[in-house]
Amino acid sequence: MAEAEAPHKKLFLAEFAEELEGLLHYCSIRQLSPAEFLVVALQPEVKVLCKEKEINYTDTLAFFDTGSHRRVLGKSHELTTLFSKQLTFNVPAAVQPVLMDTFIFYSRFYINNYLWIIEVMEGIEKKYKDIDIFVYRRAIVPGASDPRRDAYLLKRDRFLDTLVAKYCQSSKNQLKVQVIEQPQVDPDKKKKLKNGWVKRILKTTASKLFQKKLHRLSRFKTVFIAAPSYNLDRVCRDIRANFPNVQAVTHLHLPGAMSIYRYLRLCLKELKNRLKGQTPDPQLIAVPVDLFTPSSDKVKDTAVDQLKESYQKFAAGCRHEFSYGGCSFWEEFNRKVEVDLLDTLGWLLESGEGRKRFLRVLKPRLVISPVSTAEYQSWAEMSKALDIPALVIPQKTLVKPANEFARTEEYYIGRAQVTDSFQSAAAQSPLVTRYLQWSGYKGNFIETGNLIFSRLDDSKRKKKQRQLSGEIGGNKKIIVLAPSMKTRKSRRFYVLESIDELLSAMEEVFEVVSRMEGVHLIFRIHPGDAITKDEIYSLLEVPANVSVSDSGTFEDVLAAAHLLVSFSSTAVQEALVNRIPVLLYDKWNRYNHLDADRVENPVPAKVASAYYIDKKENLATSIPWILEQHTKKEITGDIFGKYAFSNDHFKNFIDFVEKCLK
């Protein structure tokens, strides 16, 4: 990690590489040296560019510690509690929980980002008493065509410049701030959609074709899968294997601005299937559910206006609460809510009837979902209205909180995974059972065992280990390092490491492993993580016995593992249900969410399924000990019983499905 110790009079905050490029352009036209600046790099891409350009930089570790995690978590929870008490949408009671839970789910991510920046600024002010702050402002081009919006924070959602400027204005030390403006560019020309009447005709035709398809499917016993991802295709195969005459149906989500040609292709493809008498794949039949929602911008605009009216009543009395460290972030929050989030809620409200119409025609015996938020919660509520059972299979780690700080974040994680909208929930491990009991879930939970996580047997593990041994050379023990790295769009605190904390911990693990013989470590990057493979190789010294994986299935990587290392990740639960030992490395001494055996001495006191280490010096001695102990055959007793059900629990799932089918 490059951090200049020499004092700097100018400090530049950058969240994206293009902002650093803006600083370099600013320096070149004013004949300044970039060496005059210390860059606070808020994301890995900025660090990489700093190293490439040989610019002094620091990360956020000096400004955002465990205390910061706790303070931000507390303020965020305070505001979301305010939503629950003060905000009510003027909508039917059946959809009220869907809109409220969705509003809180997304708005927390906005708030977390604003609070994070303000907390970093407080840390900067404490460390640097006499310094000028510089930030970059991206130009907003009037009349530019606006791409499809999203309720998540996107790269184009910029607020660093405004929050830093506000903080400096309200700071006790009256920090000086200078905003570097991006040069204006020519506006894009907005393309107008033509032949709207053709599109309406094609959509109506496609809707009728697929409605007939649903009528044909409704003659069979069907199970509706609310998402084809999250390994739910495996659940489909399980259902088909036990009930051969059952159809599994899922849906396709069609973006609102579909082209004429896309609608035409949908119609032609379905007509072709009809003419050929082709039978769709009975394992997972996909139907575009959006075709069952009448397309009317007027209907949606009316829905958004109604939601905005309710929201503005809330805003009138509570906007003053959106302040932290003397810095208001109401304008940033309000802008994102009014531009994007209310639009998403309007779509949920408008499309709810389309989902109900879809289910009414299909008449499924069971609806299955991997999460419980936004459209998935809407599916559950529409199912409830039609007396169709709905089952959620949580695909995140749900654990009973270890302390008051974890309690807050894990409550919100749980709300996105299991709500009372679903009459039933699957507990894939004893951890989930304990969580559902703690959370007060009112539905029926079924201890199913592993449904959607990796399924590894001894033969598959030995095959993958032999295969990997050939690739890396030699018969080595495999360690998988699998953290959870959230981007700014879904930033969480306390129960996850920040990206800078993660890089610091990785650096230590890499250094310890580099001195071990007969060991190879695979660092696994999940899709959509906050760091790329190239960034890791640029920022860290990657030893010869360490490789970085960013492709292929996680199941294949896990199959080769003798040990999994993480701070916290769903990968931890996936390893434990497959009876692979886990080492939680928490150098911050913050979060032992599994109540794992704490290693106080150079090696663990006894063999266990999960170990917790908070000191680097214990890694070097504990890792070889754990690998040696877990490759011995004389380990007796079910040491994984705390975290994994036996295989016979799968029968509970089959019995539940059978009951629904009857």
Image (cartoon, grey):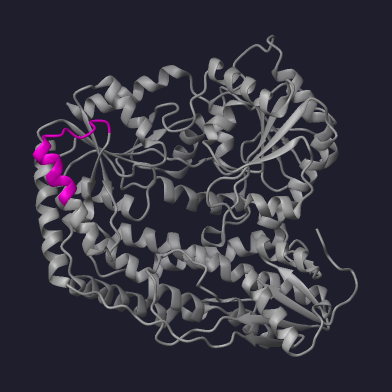
- Write the residue at 28% across / 20% down: 242
Q: Which is more toward the observer, 140 or 117?
A: 140
Tell me the quarter of the image containing the N terminus. bottom right
Confirm whether residue 590 shows in the render.
Answer: yes
Classify residue 201 as left or right of residue 146. left
Residue located farthest toward the top when viewing the structure as drawn: 634
Looking at the rendering, the stretch of residues picked out in magenta corresponds to 268-283
In the image, residue 331 sits, relative to residue 56, either above or below, namely below
Tell me which corner region of the image, top left, top right, bottom left or bottom right, holds residue 444: top left
Residue 51 in picture, x, y percent from top left: 77, 63
Residue 68 in picture, x, y percent from top left: 68, 63
Confirm whether residue 575 shows in the render.
Answer: no
Residue 209 in picture, x, y percent from top left: 11, 49
In the image, residue 347 sits, relative to residue 225, either above or below, namely below
Classify residue 306 as left or right of residue 234. left
Q: Which is more toward the observer, 464 or 649?
A: 464
Residue 485 in picture, x, y percent from top left: 60, 51
Classify residue 219 as left or right of residue 320. left
Tell me the quarter of the image containing the C terminus. top left
Residue located farthest toward the bottom when viewing the structure as drawn: 30
User: Is residue 115 found inside the magenta-colored segment of the image?
Assistant: no
Q: Which is more toward the observer, 396 or 92?
A: 396
In the image, residue 635 sits, relative to residue 430, either above or below, namely above
- Write the residue at 30% across / 78% down: 309
In the image, residue 398 sits, relative to residue 130, either above or below, namely above
- Write the residue at 67% across / 72% down: 14
Tell me which corner region of the image, top left, top right, bottom left or bottom right, holds residue 470: top right
Residue located farthest toward the right when viewing the structure as drawn: 6
- Write the residue at 49% across / 23% down: 645
User: Is residue 270 found inside the magenta-colored segment of the image?
Assistant: yes
